[in-house]
C-alpha cells in the first residue's frame, strides 16, 4: 500500500482512532491502529475491547492495501512531523514514513484483527451533535463509580413520548436531561444504558454543526457522524426507576444568580474537611441564603440575596454534589425547590437558554446532628 496525505489531516484521524486504543493492556491488537486505503480514501480503525472506532479521511492513494501500526508509535511520529505532505508505504515487511526531510522505517505487525464496523440496515435515531454534547455534559458527572452497581456507571438513554431522556444517578443525586426529539416509532419506549466512557469519547470526537445517527445492533449501539463511526456495548442491567425519585412537592422555593452561588460554594469549600464530605449548611430566611462551612481550622459564612417563596429552612449538603448540579444548569439564574431539611433539593434552570430542552437535578441532603 502507498498513500499521500497532509500531516494535519492524518494527525486528526489518528487522534480520533486513539480514543479506542487501550492505554493499559497486554493484548497487542488493542494497542494497534489498523490502516486501510482504497480509491481516494484512508480508513483508520481501532478497538480496545469496549469500543470500536472507524474514521475516514481523504488521501491520494497510489496503491491500495492495509496495515497495522502500534498506535502510540505512529501518533508520536506523525505529531512531530512538519506540516507538509506525508508519504506512507507498506512494502517488503516495512512501513516507510516520509515527510519533508524526515524518513522513518517501521516493522509491520504480522497479526491484527481489523474488527469490521458496518452500519446496520435499520432505522436510525438522529440528534444534533450540539444537543447531544450538551446533554452528555449535563449528566455524565452524576454516574456512579461503584462497579458493583454496573447499571449506575452508565447513562440511561430513554425514548418516550416524543422525547429522549438522558439520566445519571449515583445514589446521592440524579441528573435528568429531557429533549424533544423526532425518532422512528420503532424506538418508542426503548431504553439503553450506555457506558459513560463511550459517550464521553464520542462527545470529544464529534463536531457541533453535524448530527449523530444512532443505530441498535443486537447488544451494541452504533454512533455515526460525518466520517466517523463508533460501536459500543450497552450495559445489560436494569436501571433504577428514577421517576419515583424525582417528586417535586416543595414548600420553599428560591431563585438566585447561578454564578454567585457557584462562587460562594467554591469559597465555602476552602476550609471544608474532606472527611466530612465537604459539608455545607444552608440557612434560608428573609430573602437571604446563608451558606456556612466550618472545620477544625476555621469557618466561613457567605450571604446571597435570593427571591424566596415559602417558609424559612435549614439544610445541609455535600458542597461538590450541589455545585456540580448548579454548574450544569444552562441559564444565568437558577431555581431551588425544598420541602424540608430531610428531603431532596431540586434544581432547575430559570428560563433555559435552549428551547425544547429541560434539565432537572436532584441532590440529597446530609442529615444534621442534633
Image (spheres, grey):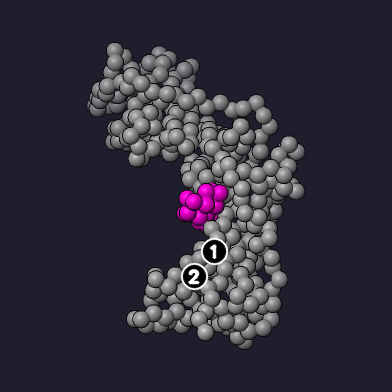
Q: Residue at x 63, y 68 (%)?
A: 346
Reply above or below: 234 against 45.
below
In this orientation, does residue 73 appear?
yes
- Are the residues tagged 2 and 1 within 8 Å (C-beta)? yes
The picture places residue 97, in percent across and down from the top left corner, at: 30, 24
Q: What number is the disc on residue 133? A: none
Residue matched to label 2:
318
Quarter of the image with the N terminus is top left
The picture places residue 207, in percent across and down from the top left corner, at: 53, 42
First in sequence: mark 2 vs mark 1: 1
Reply above or below: 334 against 86.
below
Is 345 on the left-hand or right-hand side of 202?
Answer: right
Q: Nearer the viewer, residue 201 or 133?
A: 201
Q: Residue at x 42, y 81 (%)?
A: 294
Q: Nearer the viewer, residue 117 or 82?
A: 117
Residue matched to label 1:
172
Q: Residue furthest front?
A: 148
Tag 1, which secondary structure?
A: loop
Tag 2, which secondary structure?
A: strand
Is 292 on the left-hand or right-hand side of 330?
Answer: left
Does the stretch in magenta take in 123? no
Is 243 on the left-hand or right-hand side of 231?
Answer: right
Q: Nearer the viewer, residue 233 or 306?
A: 233
Q: Residues within 10 Å of mark 1 (few under 14, many from 20)?
A: some
Bounds of the magenta span?
A: 137-154
Reply above or below: 261 against 290.
above
Q: Residue at x 62, y 27 (%)?
A: 120
In this orientation, does residue 16 appear?
no
Mark toward the viewer: 2 or 1? 1
Q: Quadrant of residue 49?
A: top left
Q: Residue at x 50, y 81 (%)?
A: 369
Amino acid at each position: 500500500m502507498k498513500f499521500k496525505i497532509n500531516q494535519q489531516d492524518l494527525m486528526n484521524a489518528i487522534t480520533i482512532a486513539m480514543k479506542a486504543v487501550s492505554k493499559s493492556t497486554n493484548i497487542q491488537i488493542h494497542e494497534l491502529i489498523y490502516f486501510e486505503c482504497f480509491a481516494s480514501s484512508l480508513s483508520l480503525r481501532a478497538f480496545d475491547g469496549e469500543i470500536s472506532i472507524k474514521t475516514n479521511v481523504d488521501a491520494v492513494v497510489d496503491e491500495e492495501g492495509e496495515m497495522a501500526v502500534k498506535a502510540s508509535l505512529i501518533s508520536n511520529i506523525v505529531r512531530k512531523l512538519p506540516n507538509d505532505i506525508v508519504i506512507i508505504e507498506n512494502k517488503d515487511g516495512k512501513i516507510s514514513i516520509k515527510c519533508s526531510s524526515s524518513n522513518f522505517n517501521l516493522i509491520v505487525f504480522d497479526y491484527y484483527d481489523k474488527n469490521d464496523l458496518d452500519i446496520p440496515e435499520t432505522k436510525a435515531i438522529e440528534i444534533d451533535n450540539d444537543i447531544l454534547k450538551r446533554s452528555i455534559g449535563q449528566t455524565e458527572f452524576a454516574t456512579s463509580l461503584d462497579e458493583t452497581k454496573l447499571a449506575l456507571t452508565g447513562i440511561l438513554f430513554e425514548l418516550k413520548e416524543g422525547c429522549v431522556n438522558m439520566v445519571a444517578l449515583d445514589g446521592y443525586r440524579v441528573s435528568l436531561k429531557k429533549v424533544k426529539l423526532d425518532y422512528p416509532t420503532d424506538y418508542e419506549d426503548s431504553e439503553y444504558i450506555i457506558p459513560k466512557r463511550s459517550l464521553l469519547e464520542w462527545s470529544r470526537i464529534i463536531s457541533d454543526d453535524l448530527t449523530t445517527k444512532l443505530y441498535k445492533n443486537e447488544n451494541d449501539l452504533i454512533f455515526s457522524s460525518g466520517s466517523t463511526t463508533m460501536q459500543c456495548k450497552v450495559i445489560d442491567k436494569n436501571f433504577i426507576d428514577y421517576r419515583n425519585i424525582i417528586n417535586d412537592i416543595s414548600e420553599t422555593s428560591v431563585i438566585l444568580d447561578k454564578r454567585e452561588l457557584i462562587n460562594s460554594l467554591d469559597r465555602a469549600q476552602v476550609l471544608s474537611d474532606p472527611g466530612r464530605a465537604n459539608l455545607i449548611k444552608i440557612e434560608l430566611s428573609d430573602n437571604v441564603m446563608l451558606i456556612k462551612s466550618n472545620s477544625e481550622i476555621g469557618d466561613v459564612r457567605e450571604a446571597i440575596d435570593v427571591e424566596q417563596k415559602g417558609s424559612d429552612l435549614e439544610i445541609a449538603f455535600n458542597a461538590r454534589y450541589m455545585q456540580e448540579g448548579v454548574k450544569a444548569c444552562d441559564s444565568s439564574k437558577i431555581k431551588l425547590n425544598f420541602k424540608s431539611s430531610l428531603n431532596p433539593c431540586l434544581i432547575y434552570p430559570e428560563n433555559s437558554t435552549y428551547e425544547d430542552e429541560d434539565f432537572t437535578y436532584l441532590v440529597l441532603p446530609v442529615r444534621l446532628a442534633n
